[in-house]
Every structure is written in structure tokens, then in C-alpha cells.
Image (cartoon, rainbow, N blue to C red):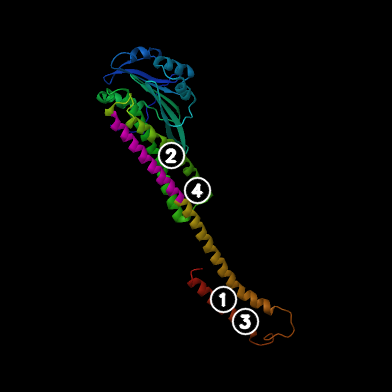
Amino acid sequence: MNVASSTIVPTEAVSSEGVVAAGVYVDGRRVASIAIDEASSWRGRPGHVVWIGLHEPSLAVLTSVQRQFHLHDLAIEDADHAHQRPKIEQYGDGLFIVARTAQLVGGSIAFGETHLFVGEGYLVSVRHGASTSYAPVRERCESCPRALARGEDYILYAILDFIVDNYSPVLETIQEEVETMEALVLANGMGRAQIERLYLLRRDLLRLRNAVGPLVEVCRRLEHDNLAMVRASMQPLFRDVTDHVKTIQEQIDSLREVLAFAFEASLLVGQAQETAVSKKLASWLAIIAVPTAIAGIYGMNFKHMPELHWEYGYYMVVGIIATTCSVLFWRFRRAGWL
């Protein structure tokens, strides 16, 4: 099953303390909505899975969650302060996973974080910064109880797959802009504003690659490390997420290469334009130099100079100037300089 991103994001209800949703599931069906302080009692019941979603929660809420699921202090500290590198860590019988999220905001990529606590009978997601609501993930999982009945490791897969899928709209928008830039380079070259935009796109893509890259290792460990929280039947699904992340990496690398080529092409186009202008200027200077030189010679104030008192001297000089300039113009035009 592929939990794809949606272009229409439902409005989520977030409490003042950052709680988005907290529910208990049995055999893939939601049986109750609970308060955070009730989580441990529900989690201890056989076949029950507690799924809690938080958005920028207060420290008090995180501390309450920690008490309910006996989470490690270091993991809670990371979840409270965000700005973590994507990673996967095991604390006792639970996993702590960090993934980076991305959205386009005002033409630039804005990054957020999702922290996931996974253990037997529970999953807690904590979102920070720019991130799409995980309400679509919960709705899709609830619409397919048979899949959701697999447990907390399936919920983990669904969220990670949703995060990776949401990179695609960002890359598609950037790709459209890159294609426009390519056409602009070939048609008219690029101005300072376009070159600055090209640089910003390359920088954002590099940041996105740094955010996406570590997810390969996260998914690889979920697939191959035989973790107690991940059943063997779920490993192929995490392999699918790994393949998707690698595809995203390849797309990012391709776009960065295209932007590099566009920048180089803009330089070449600029140099070609400058060369063409230089050739035209040199051609006209050569043509203008002929009458200038002749006029300069006959403008000297020497008393005895040939042709000064010749009846047809003026017409001869004008004819020589016109003929020489015409020949030069024809040669330069034929050579493609004019």
C-alpha cells in the first residue's frame, strides 16, 4: 500500500498544548479517543495500539507522554528542541526516529521535522515547523482496518511513506521553474535576477538532499536490522520507502545538474553576445578609421601637398573613401561580423 500525499490537506484541530489526535485501535478499528494521561492503561491491553499525534507540543505534554510510555530522556530532549539530523535510535524496547519534512513557502523550500516514538502497542508522532498534517495518513489507515491491524510498525511505515511522498510536489514545482529557466537561457540569456534565483534553487536543492539522504539509512535499518518493533512481514514495505527515497535523491541530483548546466550555458551565451558586440564594434571602427585617416592626412597645414590644387582631387578622395568603406563593409558582413 502506498500512502500518497494529497494536494488537499484537511484542517486539523490542535489543542492549546499541541495535541492533534489521540486514539486507541483494536484490529485496525478505532475504539476510543483518549487523553494523554490514559495512554498507558490502554496500551497495556492485549491487541490494543495507541496512536498519538502532536504538533509543536509543550514540554508538559512531552513529559506526560514520556511518563505514559517510559521514553528515554534524551529522546524527549531531542523532540522538544527539534533541529535534529534525520536518524534512528533504539532506547530499550522503543525506537526514536527523526525525519525532515519539506514544503514550498514563498518560492523557497521550508523545512520541518517529525519525531516518531515507536514501541509495542504505541506510536507517537511529534511535528515541528513546515509540515503537512498527518490527518490524511490517519484517515487512510482507518479506512483500511485490515492493513492498520498490522500494528504500530504499519503506522510507522505509513507516516514515513507520506513524508517521502510529500517531497515529490516540491520537486515537481522546482522542475517546472527549471524548465522555464532553460528555455530563457536558450532564448535571451539570463539577467542578474534569474542568476540569483538559480543560485537559490541550487542551495535549496542541496539542503533538501541533505534532509532526504539520511532517510535511506533509517529505512535500511528498519528493513534489515531485525528490530523487535518491526515484524519481518513489514520489511518489504520499508524497502519500498527506501527505493522511493533513492528515486527522490536521483531527481534532486538531476535538477542540480540541470541548474549547473543552465548557469554554464548562461555564461556561454553571455560571452557569445559580448563577442558578437565586440566584432560589430571592431568592424565599424575599422570602417570609420578609413575616412578619419584620410581626412586627418589632408587636414594637415602643410603648404606644399599633392592634390591640394588639383581640380578633381576632392572627388578622388571621396571616391576612395566610399570604395574602401564599401569593400570593408562587404567583407565584414560576409564574415558574419555585421
Provide the residue designation for mark 1: 325
Percent coordinates x, y for residue 166 in the rendering: 38, 34
Is the residue marked by circle 2 packed among few (<14), some (14-19), or many (20+) residues within 10 Å?
some
Quarter holding residue 52: top left
Query: Mark 3 is on which residue type?
Result: Val
Tell me the distance, in whole angstroms, between the alpha carbons under discs 3 and 1. Answer: 12 Å
Element at label 3: helix
Q: Which mark is residue 194?
A: 4
Q: Which of marks 2 and 1 is in front?
A: 2
Percent coordinates x, y for residue 185 in the rendering: 46, 53
The front one of 270 and 328 is 270
Q: In this view, does 197 lie above or below 65?
A: below
Tell me the distance, in whole angstroms, between the alpha carbons under discs 3 and 2. Answer: 71 Å
Q: Is residue 242 magenta?
A: yes
Q: Which of marks 1 and 4 is in front?
A: 4
Provide the residue designation for mark 2: 209
Element at label 2: helix
**Residue pictured at 38% horizontal, 43% vertical:** 250
Query: Mark 4 is on which residue type?
Result: Gln
Q: Earlier in the sequence, mark 2 or mark 1?
A: 2
Residue stretch in magenta? 234-260
Q: Nearer the viewer, mark 3 or mark 2?
A: 2
Element at label 4: helix
Q: Is residue 296 above or below residue 213?
A: below
Tell me the distance, in whole angstroms, between the alpha carbons under discs 1 and 4. Answer: 41 Å
Is the residue marked by circle 4 packed among few (<14), some (14-19), or many (20+) residues within 10 Å?
some
Mark 4 near mark 3, Cβ–Cβ under 8 Å?
no
Element at label 1: helix
Q: Earlier in the sequence, mark 3 or mark 1?
A: 3
Quarter holding residue 319: bottom right
